[in-house]
Image (cartoon, rainbow, N blue to C red):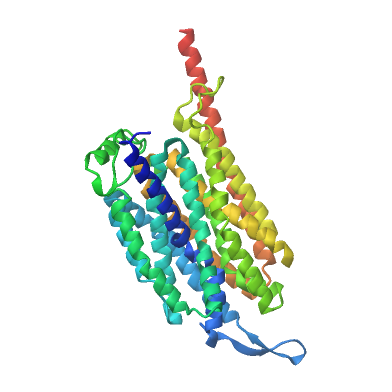
Amino acid sequence: MPGSGNSFSVQRCLTFATGLVECLCFAGAVFGWASLVFVLKEEGYFSSLCVNTTGVNDTHILDCSEQDEQFSLVFTIASFLNNFLTLPNGFLFDQFGTTVTRLYGIWYVFLSPVALAILLFPALSLLAVGGILFLMTNMQVGNLFGSHRSTIITLYSGAFDSSSALFLVIKLLHESGISLRSSFLFLSACSIVHLLRTFFLLPRKSIPYPLPDHYTYGITCGNSDNRIGEVAANGDKSFRECLLSRFFMWHLLWLSVMQLRHYLFIGTLNPMLQRLTAGESSLVSRYTNAFAITQLCGVLCAPWNGLIMDRHKGKPRAEGKFLWESEREADLRVSVLSLFLTALQCLLFSICASTPYLPLQYLTFILQVLNRSFLYGGNAAFISVAFPSCHFGKLYGLVMALSAVFSLLQYPCFALVKSLDGDPLYVNIGLTLLSLLAFIHPLSVYLHCRRVSSQRAKNKAMTFSS
């Protein structure tokens, strides 16, 4: 591995470990929304929207559908901004580098504490945008580990998913007497840790791939290492060529349809549990905790996807039709299995989520965290192998932004569920059928790899015969 002795190895390990902790504890907290909603309802947020109505047999019930709709809107806006603002943030990262981008994200997280109901909208949005910036700037750490690059990227993405359990911790602390505001103020105070990592354990610009000899970064780095990475990228495809490629278009569809399914599930989990448990608070709390606990497993599930994508690294080329393929072509070929498994997981998850049987939701939670780990880790890993590294930030930001526009469909879906007296059956069936579109992407990559492999073998045969 390129570097300058043991000091580089220690620094590299510290960068990896502290980055994993950062993603695990902070980056994706917004997706623990189901746990936070439970606390917010206990605190009386938007409780004025609950009204007394007459139910069956003239019984008086409290209708909180308007409150649920407001909470859904908060999550919809935050999840949209989490993805959509990744586009300008990706350009910021590619143009100005790691330090500027992280300072921007740290400022967002520092401003996120919330006290009033109306401030939920900006607070959750700031927390979401700051978190995705932590993930974006940490994924380049995979470039330090060569043959394990995809595994590191997916591991960080899994840690991002698992960090949604942060709101479970806040929920448990709230039940033990710690106020919600105190928890959020502590979250802001942790910004000092992010600052220390930014200046001592991350590069000022970005980590190039492949890694140059004698590469250094952090407080001791010079300017030469970044120039080496820039020179290596001069022969790559332009951003426009990447953007207009079939790979990008199908990958966008692949991400969008599955992301919509996950966002709608998370955003409607609380009212779904209310319906399946007939409003029994203890059961809702139990299943909410179970969902949040399964999110912790994201960091364990995601690396399996990376291992699938890295399984050919460091091995000699196989004899036969794959003998003459380039490293990029080999990366694309092994990514087909990852893309297909992710789409299959989403289909199974959607079927379980559509089944109105309460105990089955435990399996739904497991499939959800497994699929979400594969989805976001596979998204970043595929972009890193299919396109030039000099465009990673822009392409990652653009695919997340465009998929965020698609995910805005979750709010009209929620409104449709409400119009159907809270029964999501038909909406879930529609989303299950929609998830079938995700299988187009792995098929497209597979056909491309077969075509390129056949053409390369034909060219080699002609060369030898001549």
Residue 296 location, x and y as percent?
A: 56, 59
Residue 214 location, x and y as percent?
A: 29, 35
Marks counted in the figure total 0
Name the residue nearer the viewer: 387 or 102: 102
From the image, which quarter does the C terminus lie in? top left
Asked where in the image residue 23 lies, by quadrant, the reply is bottom left
Report whether residue 356 is seen. Answer: no
Residue positioned most to the front: 6
Q: Residue at left 50%, top 68%?
A: 76
Residue positioned most to the right: 57
Name the residue nearer the viewer: 205 or 464: 205
Residue positioned most to the top: 466
From the image, which quarter does the N terminus lie in? top left
Q: Residue at left 43%, top 78%?
A: 181
Q: Residue at left 54%, top 73%?
A: 171
Residue 447 location, x and y as percent?
A: 56, 33
Report whether residue 10 is seen. Answer: yes
Residue 192 location, x and y as percent?
A: 33, 64
